[in-house]
Amino acid sequence: MAYQPPFPSAAAQARVELQKLAAARLLLSLRSKGFNDLNLLRAMENAPRENFVGAAQVSLALRDIALPLPCGQTIESPSELALALAALGVAPHMRVLEVGTGSGWSAAVLSGLANRVVTLECFDSLARAAREKLERLKIANVAALWADGADISPELGLFDRIIIHAAVETPPPHLLGALGEGGALIAARASGERTERVLYRRIAGDRIEATSLGPCRAQALLSGLFAKL
């Protein structure tokens, strides 16, 4: 058996301290941008993004930038996710649907804000990888499913909040239909060359009210299931 040092090396300890410093810097950066909801900041702190990327991306995960994923997907930047979740106003009693699991990081953040999270990913490989990470981190209130987010099953039930990590001209009817009374849905809206983040609310009389939250970048919502990519 190879010799195992009884304590971490000085270099390993230094790396850990640098990661802690970078994580603290990121949270301070979010606060400086106006994100002062302590529940949101705590949820992001308790779901470190570096746990959801490859070894080569760990240092980048602690910066406020989007990162690439397999299958042509991306992990949005911490400030982009914070903006979406602050607008949604997720509360501890809520049931949340996420369309676009990606790495599983945003679902992990949501797990610290909501009672139950169902996250859908159309790429089988990403869904499996995210599910494994969430299970390894013992996050028990998230169900990560390989499913078509553009055409969800009614069996999933109703949700208080829905977040779509993609751009649509209008939210698909199946998703609006899954929004409970008084619920809210956030997605990017594509109109010509312009893409903006929009908050949709179900209000009295079963009407949908849309509020623009400003420009953003997002890929178009994919329809279908992708098993091998």
Image (cartoon, grey):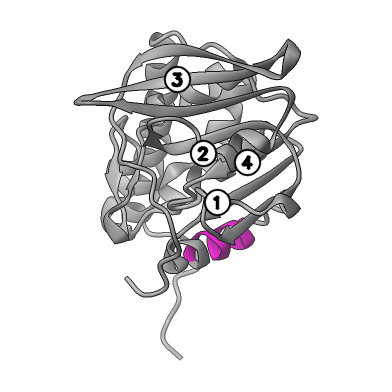
Task: Give 78 or 147, whichever is nearer the viewer.
Answer: 147
Q: Residue at x 44, y 43 (%)?
A: 49
Whether the magenta-drawn stretch holds residue 134 is answered as yes
Amino acid of disc 4: Leu
Disc 3 + disc 2, Cβ < 8 Å: no
The quarter of the rendered structure image containing the C terminus is bottom left
Q: Which residue is mark 4?
A: 97
Up the image or down, 118 lies above or below 211; here it is below
Residue 198 disc label:
3
Q: Secondary structure at mark 1?
A: loop
In this figure, which residue is indicated by the disc labeled 1?
151
Drawn side of residue 26 relative to residue 88, left or right = left
User: Mark 1: few, some, or many residues within 10 Å (few <14, many ≥20)?
Assistant: few
Q: Which residue is mark 2?
A: 172
Where residue 96 sits, quadrant-wise, is top right
Nearest to the eye among marks 4 and 3: give it: 3
Q: Amino acid at mark 2?
A: Pro
Q: Earlier in the sequence, mark 4 or mark 3?
A: 4
Cα distance between the residues tagged 4 and 2 = 14 Å
Q: Give the label, 4 or 2, closer to the camera.
A: 2
Residue toward you, 89 or 177: 177
Q: What kind of secondary structure does the magenta stretch mostly adopt?
A: helix
- Badge 2 marks a residue whose secondary structure is loop
Query: In the shown orientation, is residue 97 left or right of residue 163?
Result: right
Circles 1 and 2, Cβ within 8 Å, touching? The answer is yes
Is 140 above or below relative to 99? below
Earlier along the polypeptide chain: callout 1 or callout 4?
4
Asked whether 110 or 168 is in front, the reply is 168
Circle 3 packing at 10 Å, graded few (<14), some (14-19), many (20+), is: many
